[in-house]
Image: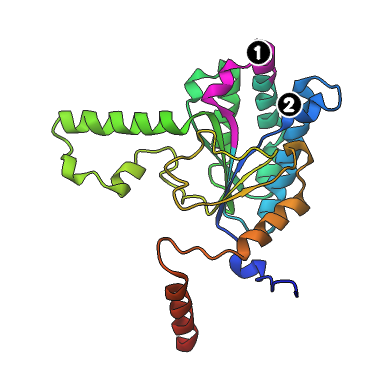
């Protein structure tokens, strides 16, 4: 059987890719290294993938950087992660400015150490006018927690008579989320071989294509990232329609050209 024809990435590159960056700890353990060294190597991968995303014309890249549940990890590991996040803000400023990338943040920054929170807010301010790509870091983020907070805000608005229950729809609900100003992900990638969402973008990923790879995050390189884009380009996204309906619409669209 011949290989399937691959669609040009120029036409089928997703607008928004979200990544669950998993496997740093296992990468280090397999090499007899401290877990924090795996996170440090993972930070290098963040730089490489961010650059690759910008090069292929991606408009939005969202990275699951630190979850609400990650606070349960050993104290020394959490402390080290906070320090790495600060180092990222300092070290990646030049990269973000060079590539015209705006930093966006979702999650509860108020829970971070003061110096870490300030470093992120300063980098967000410095890059606010960049417009070629939006890099969103999910920090102290949880999908369920985000939904609960949105529900509380709307419940309070109803209680105060500022919102009628019948006016709550998908658009209204989405407007209360941290991602209200960016589109839902077209593709979500998870590294390390785990096959679950782990409380990441639960509302936003309703129609997101999912791709799981066995590669540990520190070993995930730009070539593998671009292979994921190619995989996406060969998928048919139906959003509830049938394949026949989509094919008919595509045929009609070509006929009008």
Dividing the picture into quarters, in which one does residue 58 lie? bottom right
Q: Position of residue 192 (x, y in %)?
A: 70, 38
Magenta: main secondary structure equals helix
Q: Position of residue 59 (x, y in %)?
A: 57, 54
Q: Which mark is residue 74?
A: 1
What span is colored magenta in the figure?
64-80
Is 218 left or right of 191, judged from the image as shown? right
- The earlier-in-sequence mark between 2 and 1 is 2
Residue at 66% over, 44% down: 97
Furthest toward the top, the residue is 75
Towards the viewer: 182 or 30: 30
Q: Which mark is residue 171?
A: none
Residue 124 painted magenta: no
Dividing the picture into quarters, in which one does residue 158 lie? top left
Residue under numbered circle 2: 25
Report, in whole angstroms, how far the alpha carbon at label 2 lies from the one at label 1. Answer: 12 Å
Towards the viewer: 180 or 241: 241
Circle 2 — which element? helix
- Does the image show residue 21? yes
Residue at 68% over, 41% down: 191
Residue 72 painted magenta: yes
How busy is the neighbourhood of tag 1: few (under 14 within 10 Å), some, or many (20 plus)? few
Towards the viewer: 89 or 61: 61
Quarter of the figure with the N terminus: bottom right
Q: Is residue 176 above or below residue 257?
A: above
Q: Is residue 256 above or below residue 226?
A: below
Towards the viewer: 161 or 199: 199
Furthest toward the left, the residue is 161
- Does the image show residue 39? no
How busy is the neighbourhood of tag 2: few (under 14 within 10 Å), some, or many (20 plus)? some
Is 206 left or right of 44, judged from the image as shown? left
Q: Position of residue 152 (x, y in %)?
A: 29, 28
């Amino acid at each position: 059987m011949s290989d399937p024809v691959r669609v040009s990435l120029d036409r089928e590159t997703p607008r928004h890719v979200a990544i669950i960056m998993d496997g740093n700890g296992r990468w280090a353990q397999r090499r007899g290294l401290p877990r924090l060294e795996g996170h440090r190597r993972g930070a290098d991968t963040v730089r490489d993938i961010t650059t690759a995303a910008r090069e292929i014309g991606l408009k939005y890249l969202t990275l699951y950087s630190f979850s609400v549940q990650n606070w349960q990890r050993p104290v020394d590991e959490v402390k080290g992660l906070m320090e790495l996040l600060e180092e990222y803000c300092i070290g990646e400023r030049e990269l973000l400015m060079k590539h015209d990338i705006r930093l966006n943040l979702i999650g509860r920054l108020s829970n971070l150490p003061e110096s870490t929170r300030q470093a992120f807010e300063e980098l967000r301010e410095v890059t606010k006018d960049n417009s070629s790509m939006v890099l969103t870091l999910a920090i102290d983020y949880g999908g369920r927690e985000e939904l609960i907070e949105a529900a509380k805000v709307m419940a309070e608005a109803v209680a105060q008579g500022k919102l009628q229950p019948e006016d709550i729809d998908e658009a209204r609900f989405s407007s209360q989320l941290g991602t209200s100003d960016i589109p839902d992900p077209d593709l979500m990638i998870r590294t390390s071989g785990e096959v679950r969402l782990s409380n990441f973008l639960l509302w936003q990923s309703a129609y997101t294509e999912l791709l799981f790879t066995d590669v540990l995050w520190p070993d995930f390189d730009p070539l593998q990232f671009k292979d994921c884009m190619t995989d996406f380009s060969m998928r048919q996204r139906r959003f509830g329609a049938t394949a026949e309906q989509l094919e008919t619409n595509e045929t009609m669209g070509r006929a009008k050209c």
